[in-house]
Amino acid sequence: MTSRSAHRETWLDEAAGRLVRPYTVSAGRTRPTTAMDLLSWVVATGVRPRGRLEPDHDMALGLCGVATTVAEVAARMRLPAAVTKVVLSDLVAVGAVLTRPPSPAADPTDRSILEKLLVGLQQRL
Amino acid sequence: MSASNSDSDWAPSALKVLVAGGFGVGKTTFITATSEIPPLRTEELLTTASVGTDDLAGIAAKTTTTVALDFGRITIDRDSVLYLFGAPGQDRFWFLWDELSHGALGAVVLVDTRRLPDCFAAVDFFESRGMRFLVAVNEFDGAYRHDPREVREALSLPPAAPIVTCDARDRRSATTVLVTLVRHLLAAPSPTHANSASTEVGDRA
């Protein structure tokens, strides 16, 4: 964890924000090789890519330790979603990250899903 | 999805609800009140062809817009997580709403009665896309309290769309809005086509 935070300090500055322009990270690429939605899930597979990872790829991989969404990775990296998708799809391409669409259910408006959602929200009242 | 896993149990379902409304109406406040995490922000970079630009060189003129999206998260259970996305307030970002509303369960349109017309674009958008929504009047301190019926009339809301009042800063009040939305989703069948609804309100703005 200490190496993580040291790493963040190098690339992110509280006041100035990112110290590297977003598209430098993705080498000018705006189209990910794997289609991803803001709410697609990503998780690290445990496969460590050979060679040295670019700092942002390393950081993205670290954020995928537990299943999370593309939107959350983008927000925590302070990168535009489009750039984050490129970085994540690079990691998918080398087998370091798995991705999955937002919902495995065929229909997100499924009644049983809505009923569970209602119960879950009511419990928060 | 080349990398999709056949065993998809490793992640829950990500459900999505949009929070729309005019600029400064309290979308991020609403998300902050309901979310289990401090709201996060991501930016979508959007490249759109410019409208009405001379194209002498034969190269399509493009503009890149950065749109900030605030979002929050509510873990429902092991199998589902609800994400709340604040839809950008300005009308000119409607194309982003199209992307955002893809796969969304429904929407909350927040309204400030002092600036009622600010929510017209959102109401029009959801009606035209057949996306189910409710209107939540955010009762700001010191603002004149309008009767929800007056607001419904002013917005020419279809009878099916619920209208409620809330305090977007208050967790319980904002969560109640979400409960009402889900009840509405359970009660009302998904509209197949909303053409009739959009003509009904077409001359409003």
Image (spheres, rainbow, N blue to C red):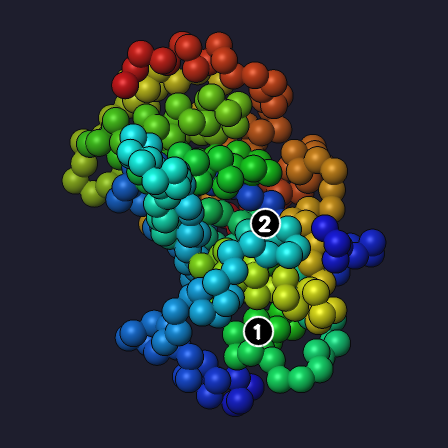
**Chain of the residue under label 2:** A
Residue B38 found in image quarter: bottom left
Give the structural element (helix, strand or loop) at label 1. helix
Above or below, A18 against B157 in this view is below
How far, Cα to Cα, is label 2 from label 1?
18 Å
Residue B191 to residue B103: above or below: above
Please name whichever residue, B14 or A6, is drawn nearer the observer in this view of the structure.
A6
| Residue depicted at x 40% and y 10% | B200
CA neighbours of label 1 inside 10 A, class few (<14), some (14 to 19), many (20+): many
Residue lying furthest front in this view?
A: B57
Task: From the top left corner, tell me how far across and down residue A67 is, in percent.
Answer: 66, 64
Mark 2 or mark 1, whichever is nearer to me: 1
The percent position of residue A7, horizontal first and vertical second, equals 48, 84
Q: For mark 2, what is the residue?
A: A37
For mark 1, what is the residue? A57
Expressed as whole percent of the image width and height from the top left, the position of residue B129 reads 50, 25
Give the image location of residue B132, x and y in percent.
52, 27
Quadrant containing the C terminus of chain B in the rendered view: top left
- Does B181 appear above or below A124? above
Tell me if residue B119 can be seen.
no
Q: Tell me which residue sits at (42%, 46%) in the image.
A: B47
